[in-house]
Amino acid sequence: MNDQIITERVHARIGLLGNPSDSYYGKTISLSLANFFAEVTLKPSDSIRFVPHLLHDGGTYSSWDLFVSRVNGEGYGGGVKLLKAMCKIFFADCKQRGLELPQQHFELSYETNIPRQSGLSGSSAIACAAFNCLLAFYGLRDRIPVADRPTLVLRAEEELGITAGLQDRVVQVYGGLVYMDFARESMQRHGHGRYESLEPELLPPLWLIYCNSPSDSGKVHSDVRQRWHQGDRTVHEAMARFASFAEKGRSAIEREDELALALLMNKNFELRRQVFGDAALGEANLAMVKCAWSVNAAAKFTGSGGAIVVLCPEGEPQEAALRAACERDGFACVPVQVGPQLHRAPSDES
């Protein structure tokens, strides 16, 4: 039996430009967020076990308010369901590839400090970390192509009814800063998009703002997805515009043009607001953007709501004003730290 204890860490992520077009054959730029992460630990065992987290999966609550808050924020199953779903998809994929797994079992547990319902991809971080543990435990890092892994993580989440695109899982697999093209032809032919690692050192200083009482990120996508499938012209044109923001953003990053990047971030948010509507975006999310705009900073959602990414093109005085505005309005405000690059795209794609 493999007696090695394995711990894998996967960081949260920020959608910088182009989202939510990743679900609609679009293009995005996303970065790994070193500030927050999930860790999964695998210990060899005589059976397959899943250890509930005392906080996120626990069944004991000190008050009604705490109970309701946890259920609203995390549902009824916590994170153990993600471990189980990832294992199911992993075993099914190995069988399909003809990879015979040895009869060695394990125990999985997890920890996370990613703020709940913050639009920072906390669920996929847990699933991706579990997947990495399984790859290491069974010695399959060289047998399952890197480009296929985000799709497998997404399938695990789809098992649980989570509706999302590939963006989050791609950047959590590759790490660093990644430009992604989810062209229909590539997706249908290969099952994944075309990915390119960018140099995070070219990014200007970015800030993360998030609230302590975030909205349910799952509500943001619902109506738009239905309209897309119905062929709504407005939605299709909007997704093409989101994709163009990512294209132009890649060029702006490479030129180190902060003003151009700031303009694109604001346009990305404004288009999202136009397509989804204020009611879907939620008052708290709009208040965070308003807070950033109060000091003339650029802002957009990191994901589906709960946090925003902010750029202050005027430099340190503007950043100081942003921190003061967040303190005034009761929002957390932290400088963005880009996570490490784990695989370089496209050279590691198969």
Image: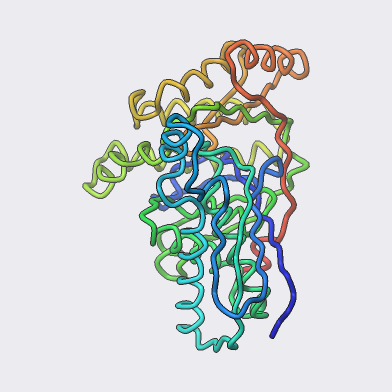
Q: Residue at x 48, y 28 (%)?
A: 269
List x then y, in percent, for residue 300: 53, 29
Quadrant of the snapshot with the C terminus: bottom right
Q: Residue at x 53, y 36 (%)?
A: 118
Q: Nearer the viewer, residue 314 or 250?
A: 314
| Residue 245 visible, this angle | no
Q: Nearer the viewer, residue 234 or 40?
A: 40
The furthest residue to the left = 230
**Residue 147 visible in the picture:** yes
286 vs 197: above or below: above
In the image, 236 versus 129, the foreground residue is 129
In the rendering, at what x and y percent does residue 299 appear?
Answer: 57, 25
Q: Nearer the viewer, residue 285 or 55?
A: 55
Q: Residue at x 31, y 41 (%)?
A: 222
Quadrant position of the N terminus in the picture: bottom right
Q: What residue is at 60 percent from the left and 31 percent from the top?
A: 309
Q: Quadrant of residue 302?
A: top right
